Image (cartoon, helix red, strand yellow):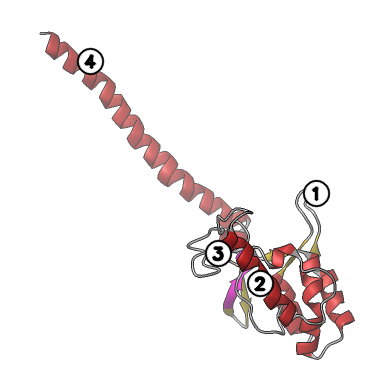
Amino acid sequence: MNMQKIKDATLRHIAPAVMYTIVSVILLGIVYPLAMTGISELIFPAQASGSVVYRNGIAIGSDIIGQLWTKPEYFHGRPSAAGSGYDPTSTSGTNLGPTSKKLIDATAATIKALKKDNPDAAGPVPMDLVTSSGSGIDPDISPEAAYYQAPRVASARHMTVDTVRAVIASHIVPRELGFLGEPRVNVMQLNLALDGQK
């Protein structure tokens, strides 16, 4: 008799819990994401679709996902530890601490390579050119990182450094609301602007 009461009490508690779980999964796992995606597509279609950048009708990248730029005529972004590099399906940082010998050696090697690739650059190497971001797909660099690369880009494009610096200055995005974050330059937009100068 007592066992039957226990079973009945258990079923009275389990049935609502199972129903609540099913309803929650349907509402919060299916209905809500679809509704938010639909609203986003209506209000912010470009952003909801990944801020894809097109050239001559062909998708060449995204404003919000960094990519590997290696040619001397292009500005280079931050190093990436995402997957095999700039992999948006495997975003991550190096997870190496400041005392890690591997991080110190990698940073030193990157600084050496940057100085070799940018022999006419003035000033110290900006840190965002030698350290990867937490995501590994950061699309932006600091204005200092862009100005550091300006002599190399100008030389490779047969432009004056002043012209390249003017393009950089016109692409600096200030702090959000005047105090959030740091000024930044979107690498893809900067490189596309320079391509448009030809």
Range of the magenta residues?
59-65
| Residue 175 seen in render | yes
- Please state which of the two labelled residues, at mark 4 or mark 3, is closer to the viewer: 3
Of the two numbered discs 4 and 1 on the same chain, state the one appearing first in sequence. 4
| Residue 77 seen in render | no
Looking at the rendered structure, the kind of residue marked 4 is Ala
- Please state which of the two labelled residues, at mark 2 or mark 4, is closer to the viewer: 2
Residue carrying label 3: 81
Of the two numbered discs 2 and 4 on the same chain, state the one appearing first in sequence. 4
Identify the mark at residue 9; answer none if there is no mark: 4
Q: Residues within 10 Å of mark 1 (few under 14, many from 20)?
A: few
Front-most of residues 14 and 150: 150
Whether residue 77 sits left or right of residue 1 in the image: it is: right
Was residue 63 drawn as part of the magenta stretch in this picture?
yes
Determine whether 158 is above or below 22 in the image: below
Identify the mark at residue 110; answer none if there is no mark: 2
Residue carrying label 1: 177
